[in-house]
Amino acid sequence: MARSKYIIAVDIGGTNTKLGMVSTNGRILRTTSFPTCRRRGDVIDRVIKEAYGLVNSTHIRKRDILGIGMGVAGPTDHSRGLIHHFVNVPGWRNTPLARIVRSRTKLPTFIDNDVNVMTIGELYFGAGRGAKNMICLTLGTGVGGGVVIDGRLHRGSNLVAGEIGHMPINVVGRKCNCGGIGCMEMYVGNKYIVENALRRLKGKKNSLILKLIGGDRRKLTPEVLAIAARRGDKTANAVWADTGLHLGVAIAASVSLINPERVVIGGGVAGAGEVLFKHIRKAVENRTMKEHRHGLRIVRAKLGSKAGLVGAMQLVKLSLKERME
Amino acid sequence: MARSKYIIAVDIGGTNTKLGMVSTNGRILRTTSFPTCRRRGDVIDRVIKEAYGLVNSTHIRKRDILGIGMGVAGPTDHSRGLIHHFVNVPGWRNTPLARIVRSRTKLPTFIDNDVNVMTIGELYFGAGRGAKNMICLTLGTGVGGGVVIDGRLHRGSNLVAGEIGHMPINVVGRKCNCGGIGCMEMYVGNKYIVENALRRLKGKKNSLILKLIGGDRRKLTPEVLAIAARRGDKTANAVWADTGLHLGVAIAASVSLINPERVVIGGGVAGAGEVLFKHIRKAVENRTMKEHRHGLRIVRAKLGSKAGLVGAMQLVKLSLKERME
């Protein structure tokens, strides 16, 4: 029997960096993590130190390790292994991260942005399994997206495809930080969900939402709104109806254009579950043709916080395969 | 030197059906056409008769004819050669058109909807040449669309991708015939352009537009509005600004999702030219990120009325090639 092969997966987030030793069939053997420090050199040194630590503690032989895969919270150039810039952390502009790590570890190294990595993870090991055409969204401070066409991640002509959060959903709309107008994430980002709830809570002193946060409006989060909605709170439900509607309009537009069979939605806000998903599905149903909805499933992401590691492993497998073609 | 090969191209429109003998390098040798009759059987009989007529009049030997390609104004199943239904003409539901024509001519026959055929034509012989990722729009009564991903027409999971005209551009919007809400074509279809102009003309008795149509508002068309705008008429320009804005919002959404390098726009309304295109470009510029606009070109389709025949020829070439893979 062939010996198992492994990949060192790295998930560099704005707050924490995670590493995992992942088998090529998607099993995570061991993980470790550290707070993402401010200095670029420190982050890279620490990643390499932790990677060697994983090799030593799992007793995997170096010849059974196929490479290193890294997902990064920021725009990257996958083909050249570059980080364009790193969300909220200065000093990373145009870092040739793949080359640096490759030269220090002598292992094939590939990077991509975190949403593409999550999309690949869900496609091969999560809620996207078996899908030929798929859209993947991740909901949080902003809205990230990935597009799968004919079973492959679609990166686009400038490697920036999948910006579902920046699809305009209104002709006249809010001005977005990206420079756009009416971008979807201006209606459904964490901050806007909370703002919408606070607006709707004005004058409502007996709301279940307020009880859950002990009357302290600064403690209001999407998680609290999800609990309240599940218990039947009308204000919370109205907030999720708005959120689902706005997400649904951009998803309907994507479905009309690409005709996928699967829409996978992850990220913190997706944790609201059915109280959000029922409104998304309704909005999409009201805004797409029957022919587009046939066989279409809108589902929650499955891998959760593991998506970054499993996806980074799969990124290496796919990149090595492409290289051999 | 290898002998030239030919394909019989057919463009079945709601009003007229065109046929052409087209060489595999895109040259149209000879064409013929007839009014698309009401009865399905009559249309098919006539197509076959005219096809034999083309063969006889061009003296091309049957062994040099590789097949028949047909573009149809209505939803089709390319893979099974089916017409789902035919725009405005009853009696075509689920017609196995490719099989019928193949069995009567003994030639490999392939069909697709007219917008996909136009997209393939522009991609290989028109304004889309060299593009890897492209969006194609055709403007008329409604708005059709085609999507090219990595150099290939993207058909989608149910073969209904590319419905750019049915992408919602407003959360709260006009109800569309398709069942949707705020569909882009509800703002830019021929009829809506004229309605917008009539609304803006109220109380304006000295408008250049009215002079051009001798005061008869029933004669108002997009063509007249294009002439007026080119001569500096402010009302006409305002109508094109609205049209460009609404088209631009859906194009911006498509660009953010797919990241193409080319947007090709054809169909009657595109004939307005710069008076429309400058507003489309501005709307897209205001609603996309710099990274998406780098290298992006929004251009007019090149093949005009030939797109249907040249595209149907290329459809056969591609389908035969796929079959051999």
Image (tube, coloured by chain):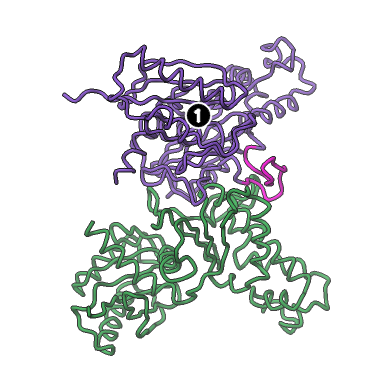
Chain colours: A purple, B green
Q: Nearer the viewer, residue A77 or B258?
A: A77
Q: Is residue A130 left or right of residue A153?
A: left
Residue at the spot 65% in from the left edge and 71% down from the top edge: B274
Q: Nearer the viewer, residue B36 or A140?
A: A140
- Magenta segment, prevailing SS (helix, strand or loop): loop
Say if residue A274 shows up in the picture.
Answer: no
- Residue at the far top in the pictured view: A214
Residue A58 percent location from the top left of the image: 34, 14
Q: Which residues are magenta?
A: A168-185
Say if residue A88 shows up in the picture.
Answer: yes
Is residue A244 inside the magenta stretch? no
Name the secondary structure under disc 1.
strand
Q: Is residue B216 left or right of residue A44?
A: right
Residue at the spot 57% in from the left edge and 39% down from the top edge: A94
At label 1, counting other C-alpha atoms closer than 10 Å, the crowd grade (few under 14, some 14-19, many 20 or more) is many
Residue A250 lies in what quarter of the image?
top right
Write down the residue under mark 1: A266
- Residue at the far left in the pictured view: A1
